[in-house]
Amino acid sequence: MSVRVVDASFRPRWWLRGRHRQSVLPSLPLRRVAVERHARPLRVASRARRVDCGDGTTLQALHAAPRAPRPEPALAVLLHGWEGSAESLYILSLAQRLHAHGYEVVRLNLRDHGDTHHLNRELFHSCRLPEVLGAVARLQADFPRHRLLLGGFSLGGNFMLRVAAEAPRAGLAIAGAVAVSPVLDPARTLDALESGLWIYPRYFVRKWSRSLRRKQAAWPGAFDFAPLLRSRDLRRMTADLVRAHTDYPDLESYLAGYAITGGRLAGLTVPATIVTALDDPMIPPQDLDRLPREPRLRVVVTERGGHCGFLETLGAGSWVDRFVHAEFERQLAAGEASEAHARQSAAVASPAAGPAAAHAGVAR
């Protein structure tokens, strides 16, 4: 069964407690100066590249090589949430920590996120898993000596857990995955957005509308989003997009298409960790009980933290940066121990090795 852990180590300052403060304050512009200053080594080292995902799809990534690599090379691929980007503050903050500790870091942009609207004609939607699988496969091929780790926030966490679930069929060797505040059941998240604080649907409608205008400008004559943009209603906009730009017959089937509740993560072979807060205003904690009971899935919950928040102060860095880094280290160590045990077992069992060679193999 999946492992459920309550982590009480996140203790924000009193004035940062509260689900809405934790969800809203981390992305405020006033933090950008501090986070970008803190992440300057990462940003200076980052190089933009286009990733061929197959089937004619191209995604953009920002790669930063560390000055002092880990003894065991590791590649961390990080993915932002919906209408975020590789420059989102939570991505920069985590990426800087991993980069400083010797990880190769790739910050991946989803289709039509960041400055990428011109790269692919078709519109982004949340069921475009094959291209994210293709991007991860391409990156793994480009870094064959590195252990591969996946990290994602919100919708990016949802994507990375689906990538982990598809790893055997996609030929991916993934050492571990960590999802921060991942979308579990999109239908329930949409309900929570509509029934919660007004600022959340307004925020997403504003950012999504701006993204659609950029898409239309990048592909003159290909799109007319004027009717879609007039509604200013998140549910109606999503339903209209589904009908016009996906193969799904209705909103309900589309939302179910990227849910990770039920059996979506059944048979998970990759060590994966979900960390989420019980006060998340967008992810109902009851949905955690609808995840499959898988021994490879570790679920860590905190009492506070909001949605992708986990801020102890308004400065650079966060509790979740340390948490994800520690989880990656734990997953790498577990994988190395498992491989060492397998090598020793193979040496002992090999009839060609002979008793002396087998004994030497055990002793190494």
Image: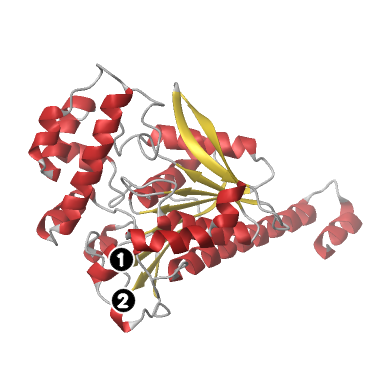
Q: Quadrant of residue 57?
A: top left
**Residue 306 appears in the rendering:** no
Which residue extends farthest top? Answer: 221
Which of the marked residues, 1 or 2, is nearer the chain's N terminus?
2
Please give left or right for residue 137 compared with residue 113 in the image.
Answer: right
Q: Residue at left 67%, top 40%?
A: 144
Frontmost residue, 146 versus 219: 219
Q: Tag 2: residue type?
A: Leu
Which element is circle 2 on? helix
The residue at 43%/79% (across/down) is: 9
Tag 1 residue: 25
Expressed as whole percent of the image width and height from the top left, the position of residue 17 reads 28, 77
- Labels 1 & 2 near each other (Cβ < 8 A): yes
Numbered disc 1: secondary structure:
helix
As drawn, the label of residue 16 is: 2
Cα–Cα span, label 1 and label 2? 9 Å
Query: Which of these two is toward me, 4 or 217?
Result: 217
- In the displayed structure, 8 sits above or below 43; it is below
225 to 150, vertically: above or below: above
